[in-house]
Image: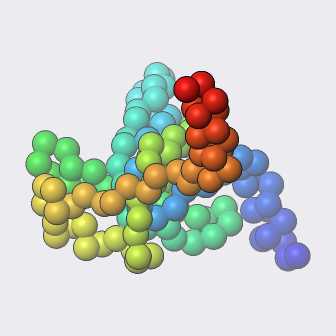
Amino acid sequence: MNLIDRIEAGELKKEAPQVRIGDTVRAHIRIVEGEKERIQVFEGVVIRLHGGGVRETMTLRKVSFGVGVERILPLHSPRLEKVEIIRHAKVRQAKLYYLRDLRGKAARLKELKPKVDSTKKKKNKKIAKKKD
């Protein structure tokens, strides 16, 4: 491990957000205005993950008042308070730049539902039959 890797290892967040391409996330960012600090929330779709280690960034895209807005956020920045994952989407590409050219319903991504354990379904059916 060289010197740069050792320095960067100390800057890594212990609980880095596990985001994927296509996720809709809500990022809470600490903004400093003069002497005051506040939290600003930016909600958008992850269209790009770039880099690795302490230099890893994600690009979020949202449409605000009819204008597309993109923001690049370092995942290990101390200014990034937390990242909430709102929903996952099914995507087949590593970069979703094609969303920039789409408008309205065409720009939607197909939502991934959480996997349901099949053994729980069978148990529920048996319980329902016993109640009848």
User: Can residue 6 be seen in the rendering of this structure?
Assistant: yes
Quadrant of the drawing holding the C terminus: top right
Q: Residue at x 40, y 77 (%)?
A: 93
Could you say which quadrant of the image residue 105 lies in? bottom left
* In front of the other: 34 or 122: 122
* In front of the other: 108 or 95: 108
The percent coordinates of residue 101 (x first, y second) are 16, 70
Outermost residue on the right side: it is 1
Q: Residue at x 30, y 72 (%)?
A: 97
* In front of the other: 132 or 75: 132
Q: Classify residue 56 as left or right of residue 15.
A: left
Q: Residue at x 16, y 63 (%)?
A: 106
The percent coordinates of residue 102 (x first, y second) are 16, 66
Could you say which quadrant of the image residue 103 lies in? bottom left
Q: Classify residue 14 as left or right of residue 6.
A: left
The percent coordinates of residue 112 (x first, y second) are 44, 56
Q: Residue at x 21, y 61 (%)?
A: 107
Q: On screen, 80 above or below 130?
A: below
User: Can residue 79 be seen in the rendering of this structure?
Assistant: no
- Could you tell me how many numbered marks the image carries? 0
Could you say which quadrant of the image residue 86 lies in? top left
Image colouring: rainbow
